[in-house]
Image: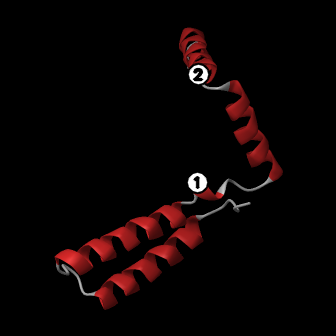
Amino acid sequence: MKKIDEDIMHKVIDDIIDSYDKEKMKELVQDLREGGKPFYLSKTLWINIIALGAIVAQSYYGYVVSPEIQGILLVLVNIALRKITKEELK
């Protein structure tokens, strides 16, 4: 990469970092260094919340996919997420 491109990239990154709350950034970095990410950053948690919402909505408005198939699909998605997840929750 050209020196000018690298300088521009670093300036953009620095500007982005400066625009965030520095204390919050320090806290997130410290959390990651200590091992594990906050639970609310869990992809598995959000997939399960979305799936629950979809199942509840379908129970009121009619099922597009049967609950049994939805359950099986959710288990498979959770297994896949477990396989690709590298970071622990704290």
Indicate the quadrant where residue 35 lies.
bottom right
Q: Position of residue 34 (x, y in %)?
A: 82, 50
Q: Residues within 10 Å of mark 1 (few under 14, many from 20)?
A: few
Q: Is residue 27 left or right of residue 49?
A: right
How far across and how far down the image is residue 68, in percent?
Answer: 33, 91
Query: Measuring 58% from the left and 20% from the top, which residue is drawn there?
Result: 19
Secondary structure beneath label 2: helix
- Judged left or right of residue 72, residue 1 is right
Q: Looking at the image, is mark 1 or mark 2 nearer the viewer?
A: 1
Residue drawn at (74%, 47%) of the image = 32
Label 1 secondary element:
helix
Q: Nearer the viewer, residue 68 or 53?
A: 53
The C terminus is located in which quarter?
Answer: bottom right
Q: Quick check: 46 left or right of 3?
A: left
Q: Would you place residue 42 above or below residue 66 in this image?
A: above
Residue situated furthest top in the rendering: 4
Amino acid type indicated by mark 1: Leu
Which residue is most to the bottom?
68
In the displayed orientation, state which residue is furthest to the right.
Answer: 34
Q: Is residue 77 left or right of residue 42?
A: left
67, above or below 52, in the image? below
Say which residue appears at 55% left-offset and 17% top-offset.
12
Mark 1–mark 2 Cα distance, whole angstroms, equals 22 Å
Residue 45 position, x and y percent, is: 53, 65
Residue 13: mark in rendering = 2
